[in-house]
Amino acid sequence: MTQSRISMPVVSELDLIFQDHLKLDNFWDQQQLVSEPNEPKKIISFVQRIPTIDPLAFLQNFNHSNSLHFYWENPRKQEAVIACGVTQKLLIDSRDRFKIAQNFIQKCLKKTVRKGETSITGAGPHLFCTFTFFPDADKSYSPFPAATVFLPRLQLIKKNKSCLLIVNVPVNYADNSKLIVEEIKQKINSIDWSLQQKLNSEINECFASNYNSISEDSEYFKSVVTSALNSIAIDEFSKIVLAYATDVVSPVPFRLIKSLDNLRQRHPDCYIFSTSNGRDNNFIGASPERLVSIQNKQLVTDALAGSAPRGKTTAEDVQLANLLLKNRKEKREHQAVSDFLIERLRQLDLKPQQLPLQLLQLSNIQHLWTPIYAHLSHDLDPLEIVAQLHPTPAVAGVSTEIACEQIRRYEKFDRSLYAAPLGWVDYQGNSEFIVGIRSALIEGNRARLYAGAGIVSGSNPEKEFAEIQLKLQSLLKALV
């Protein structure tokens, strides 16, 4: 039996010692804090409504490069969740990562006490999670562990014009909770939130750099598609999703905030995201694909596969949409995803229902889309559902196990967080996870851009490569 290696929660960085009086300056400034040897006995999770601010400005002002962050915004829905800093975290290197992560979440929430404006819907702590595509990511290529789970120091939740700030402070039984809460209130009220209503001007004035691009061999990719088609022809598998990577080098470091701002302006219908490992590695992107959303026991997942470009005119756009809806190859690829999701949910004793096939039209591409719903009539941990659904045929293939084996054989790079689940779980068991596609791994002045194509019977190597270039160019234009 392979022995699992699990890093213990990092709490030494965060245990506050309150001596003569509470000092939160280091806590807010993300500095190393004086610590006690043991875990905090309790965590105060304080929530307060604050003036409407720009979520990205919050990240810009409160994030520190040497700590973890999680940024998530859907501009069209006017929703955002941002986490900065760490109150507790767990790094996992184990094939049982989903179960271990869920147990850590439950343990963390069990000692969390909510304070402040707790009557507001959703006003409570969230734990943020990232998982690599494969549970045994190649350490020499992936700067992220198999799983990362953390409760942040500071968290912003924005829905429409409403903004909530959540502060998670670790304390011990001897500490004066009332005094701590009053100190947090004073600190929140002392912040000039008007300065966070928009990005700093110097961020808005930066310009795109000239890049040197080092792409994977295009002919190799096309040959791999041909090889996969030969395997499909003899029924080794029916679909495989092949990823392609382009490495980009800039004369100056990439600007995280401005790149994210470009992504949300260019892709308002997508989930704009960024997460870090606290060591100057950031994984960002604009994903159209939601893996699972759970709100008040109602589950929603998306079958999203089969694509076509958008037209340059209204007439061309309509024509391309109609061709996509009638395209047998694209519909076959989409059906494989839909069937997989429904079957996997049924294995959890759920009764999924699906809406009719429709189009999800984004700024530069359109997809076949089938929303699938289910009611959670019994207790199911969110990460148990995520584990059941990842990876879907939209990012792996059919059958999943065989496709993943072939992906390891064909692809020359480790996927790391590409096409993997990224999301959060809250104190009520609500959660939302997206799939990390249309994404880039950034380190200083270097970026690795990822895109993939679903290969099924009838696929054409030239067309699949062209589709990948379309996805990559859209992402590249946003990086500065």
Image (cartoon, rainbow, N blue to C red):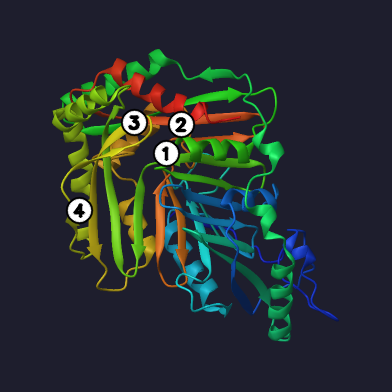
Q: Residue at x 79, y 77 (%)?
A: 22
Q: Quadrant of the N terminus?
A: bottom left
Q: Earlier in the sequence, mark 1 or mark 4?
A: 4
User: Which residue is denoted by mark 3 in the rendering?
Assistant: 365
Q: Secondary structure at mark 3?
A: strand
Mark number, residue 342 = 4
Could you say which is closer to the camera, residue 91 or residue 477?
477
Which image quarter: residue 116? Answer: bottom right
* Rendered view: 361 above or below 69: above
Could you say which is closer to the camera, residue 161 or residue 327?
161
Mark pair 2, 3: CA separation: 16 Å
Q: Earlier in the sequence, mark 2 or mark 4?
A: 4
Q: CB atoms at circles 2 and 4 under 8 Å apart?
A: no
User: Which residue is denoted by mark 2 in the rendering?
Assistant: 450
* Rendered view: 132 above or below 455: below
* Numbered disc in front, either 2 or 3: 3
Position of residue 409 measured from the top left corner of the image (x, y, whole percent): 38, 29
Mark number, residue 437 = 1
Kind of residue at badge 3: Ile
Q: CB atoms at circles 1 and 2 under 8 Å apart?
A: yes
Q: Residue at x 30, y 24 (%)?
A: 311
Q: Residue at x 65, y 58 (%)?
A: 85
Position of residue 387 measured from the top left corner of the image (x, y, whole percent): 36, 56
Which image quarter: residue 11? Answer: bottom right
* In the displayed structure image, the side of residue 382 where residue 230 appears, left or right: left
Kind of residue at badge 4: Ile
Mark pair 2, 4: CA separation: 28 Å
Q: Residue at x 50, y 45 (%)?
A: 273
* Numbered disc in front, either 3 or 1: 3
Mark pair 3, 1: CA separation: 14 Å
Mark pair 1, 4: CA separation: 22 Å
Q: Secondary structure at mark 1?
A: loop
